[in-house]
Image (cartoon, rainbow, N blue to C red):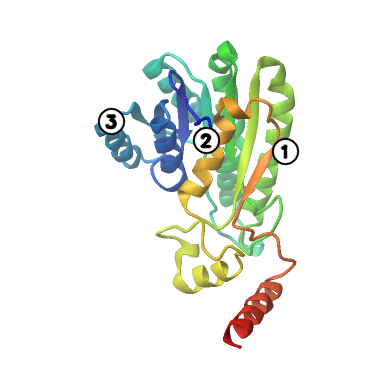
Amino acid sequence: MTPLRFDGKAALVTGAGRGIGAAVATRLAEAGAAVMLANRSLAAAEDPAAELRARGLQAQACAYAADEAGCRQAVADTVAAFGRLDVLVHNAGGCPWSALETLTTATLREALQLNLESCFWLTQAALPALKVRGGRIVVTSSVTGPRVAMLGAAHYAAAKAGVNGFIRSAALELAPLGITVNGVEPGFVAKPRGRLSQPETKAQLVREIPLGRAGEPDDIAWAMLYLASEQARWVTGQTLVVDGGMTLPESGQVMDEFHANLQAKDGS
């Protein structure tokens, strides 16, 4: 089987300080790419970048902000460092939790800027470099919004549904330039902190996953690596769901009954 290789190519990964972004940056660097790890906290990106350099891999870190100026600066830093840009992985995002009843203008704008608006500015800034040889754009979307809903996340869900619309429209517009645009819709990926890291919440979510465990950053990274590769040259405008089967059942009750029946059968 031909390995996914990125020798001689340069990549920009946003939200690369930890989790999915750090995993994507690591796998790209291991596959031969020169990688810029961009993160809102520069210090958080410098540590994984230094670890990659210590392994003899090409990696640098830069600051990232989700506004137009920050997006343009991250792209400029990448091109200045490596002389080219072939792969843009936009992973930075987040959910500032809020019920609809208490949602503020600031929180709504934050969710839209972090998850959706930044897609436009990063892509626009990257186009001059990506047009030179054709390139890949891969965006982290979510199952929340395009496929399912979550309490306290209507603004986040709307932003991620918008991300999928952006992916399809941008793919159509950029196809004549040899640029593909795709996305990954992660399900529940375990994190060391935050609302979904609370033991009871995490346990409840894991019970809803047919494959029986929470996702790991690498589960998403490998999907992104494929979409960014030469092997995916005829794939564009698509999103790949990577959720352990979480969105397959019609309801959580279905899964509870399924597991109960399995346990009863095993015990008989």
| N-terminal-most mark, 1 or 2 | 1
User: Height in image: 209 above or below 119?
Assistant: below
Q: Are marks 1 and 2 in contact (CB under 8 Å)?
A: no
Residue 127, picture quadrant: top right
Residue bearing mark 1? 165
Q: Are marks 3 and 2 in contact (CB under 8 Å)?
A: no
Residue at the far left: name it.
54
Q: Is residue 12 left or right of residue 267?
A: left
Q: Please report the residue visible at 28 percent of the width from the left and 37 percent of the height from the top.
A: 51
Amino acid of disc 2: Leu
Tell me the quarter of the image containing the C terminus: bottom right
Amino acid of disc 3: Arg
Secondary structure beneath disc 3?
helix
Amino acid of disc 1: Gly
Q: Position of residue 170 (x, y in %)?
A: 69, 28
- Residue 225: mark in rendering: 2
Q: Please report the residue visible at 58 percent of the width from the left and 47 percent of the height from the top.
A: 111
Closer to viewer: mark 3 or mark 2: 2
Closer to viewer: mark 1 or mark 3: 3
- Closer to the camera, 115 or 89? 89
- Residue 53: mark in rendering: 3
- Closer to the camera, 115 or 205? 205
Residue 98, picture quadrant: bottom right
Q: Position of residue 267 (x, y in %)?
A: 57, 86
Residue at the far bottom: name it.
268
Q: Is residue 49 left or right of residue 2?
A: left
Q: Position of residue 1 (x, y in %)?
A: 53, 33
Q: Please report the residue visible at 41 percent of the width from the left and 41 percent of the height from the top.
A: 22
Q: Residues within 10 Å of mark 2 (few under 14, many from 20)?
A: many
Secondary structure beneath disc 2?
helix
